[in-house]
Amino acid sequence: MRWLAAFVALSGAAFLMGDYHNDVYRKMLLWITLALSYNFLFGICGQVAFSHFAFYGIGAYSVVILLFQLHVPLPVAIVLGVAVCVLVALAVAIPATRLEGFYLALATLALAQLFVVVLNEGGAVTGGTGGIANYRLPAVFGFQVKGAWYTGVIVALLLGTYALLRRLDHSWFGRACRAVRDNPEAAAAMGVDVARTKVVAFALTSALAGMAGMVYAFVDNTVNPPIFGLENAFLLLFMVIVGGAGRHAGAVIGAALLFLLPFFLSPLVGHHHVLVFGVLVVAAILLKPKGLIGFYDAIRRS
Amino acid sequence: MPSVVLEVRNLSKRFGGLTAVSGLDFDVREGEILGVIGPNGAGKSTTFNIIAGAYPASGGDVRFAGESILGLPPHKIAARGVMRTFQHNRPFAGMSVADNVLVGAHTRFGFNVFGKKSLLDEKANRARAEELMEFVGLGELRQADVATLSFGQGRLLEIARGLAGEPRLMLFDEPAAGLTPAELTRVSGVIRGIAERGIAVLLIEHDMHFLLPLAHRVVVLNFGAKIADGLPEEVRSNPAVTDAYLGSHAAAR
């Protein structure tokens, strides 16, 4: 019931906005969705990966290529798109987690870079540097979902992602992820298969990022390489750190804040808002390692 | 006589040219507290780590409930019913005391995390975690952040976390290390309570004052080999043991 109310409120808001504000709003919702799944990977499972935004791109490109180059029906394209994300995630995570420590970071950084190169060099399949544009979401049961109605799809994605991650977090799987993050040797002694837990968390959150990417593909009805570069991969990391790694609410606050901040900062400092982000992140790490949500907890306790 | 839970047979471990453990044999039975003692470098920790799956052995066998567990990774050994504590407490620092204990129950959950069955699993394991926190004396601290625990409370948490896996064998790696006299009394009481539940207990320890009144039987190691095996009072008066601990000069006097 509460979920339904949240769905109605969050999607209904889109109908009260103009086109411009609706566009900003739905992109914020997508960032929040991505930050939630990245928080599970980085904040809860402790895996430093830079590939999350690349999986967002893999999902977006997969669904567009499957639908409009290969002419696959929509439901099949969605299933295949998720399968592509899971397979790529397994191909990266299985060798990387066998190694210690920061090799996952290196492997995922390489993947993120490679992905952009593939997009640029992909010729007719990926549309090269210009990407793919001018397509439309196929009609579902004869309905063309567009405009403020499409925001409802994004809200459903956001709530579905949150419900799934929350359920996992409160289960043995979430505790195993936190245990692996805090002390892998002790986790193994308690019966946790450390390598498998890491691989499953990585593949699962990467698939969630891919699904968000599929939804993103029909927001602007264009996909192109620059969006999926490393800059946004780091922005995602900053969102989770500033909001408070390991907490769902932290991911939501961090994503909303860092996404909206440039809109308020740009009139004041132009493109130097990146500098403000840098200062924010360093301040968060040094002064409030638990992020804004930790700050909120401290205020509420006192 | 209670049945044998752990059998260590002809166990050997060499690190390069150094023989850390050689030809070691001993058993642990249900409800029995077996202490393994010896001076520094006697091979206690090596033996412990081989049983827990942290090191491979060079020879011999370790059998738990009739099956060899030698060479299994630590998480599979835990899943069989062998749980352990660490000498230097290793809590999951970002979680509450209750969640730490629930990680110990990891292998007691069904695979599915959705639906009614998973909620019942969660409820049953939470209730058991509560009971275990009461048992070790952390009942008041169940929602506390583990960072706020004292070292002794951290040791009790290690014990509750291990018990949550419903072990048939509990391994203690120097449980007395770093504890105050009051905490030692408490930990001794808890370990006795564990054995009374029918769980086999294997302790490695070099604090004889802690171990001898607690253990039902004691195995003494020196230079990787067993030099004595018997009741605590027999071991205490065994000349080979005093010799190993204090040197032959002291034994001769």
Image (cartoon, rainbow, N blue to C red):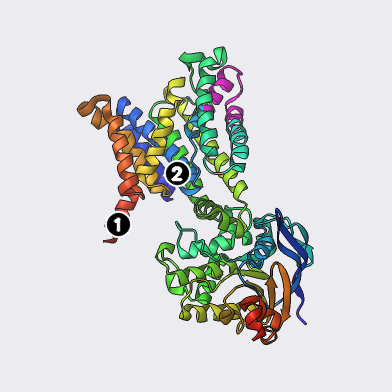
Chain of residue at mark 2? A
Q: Where is residue A73 in the image (x, y as percent from the top left)?
A: 60, 24
**Is residue A222 among what the camera can see?**
no
Residue B8 within the segment the image draws in magenta = no
Mark 1, other Cα within 10 Å: few <14 / some 14–19 / many ≥20: few
Among the two numbered marks 2 and 1 on one chain, the one whose residue lies closer to the N terminus: 2
Q: Which of A230 and A80 is in front in this view?
A: A230
Label 2 sits on what residue type?
Answer: Asn
> What residue sits right under mark 1 in the picture?
A298
Q: Where is residue B79 in the image (x, y as percent from the top left)?
A: 67, 60
Position of B234 relative to B104 (above/below): below
Q: Nearer the viewer, residue A16 or B215?
A: B215
Label 1 sits on what residue type?
Answer: Ala
Identify the residue at horizontal 78%, vertical 82% (top origin). Answer: B1
Mark 2, other Cα within 10 Å: few <14 / some 14–19 / many ≥20: many
Horizontal arrangement in the rendering, residue B18 relative to residue B175 (left or right) = right
Residue B33, labelled with which disc?
none
Q: Position of residue A244 (x, y in %)?
A: 37, 47
Identify the residue at horizontal 46%, vertical 77% (top origin). Answer: B180
Q: Is mark 2 on a helix, strand or loop?
A: helix
In the image, the segment drawn in magenta is A58-82
How would you classify the magenta stretch by its main secondary structure? helix
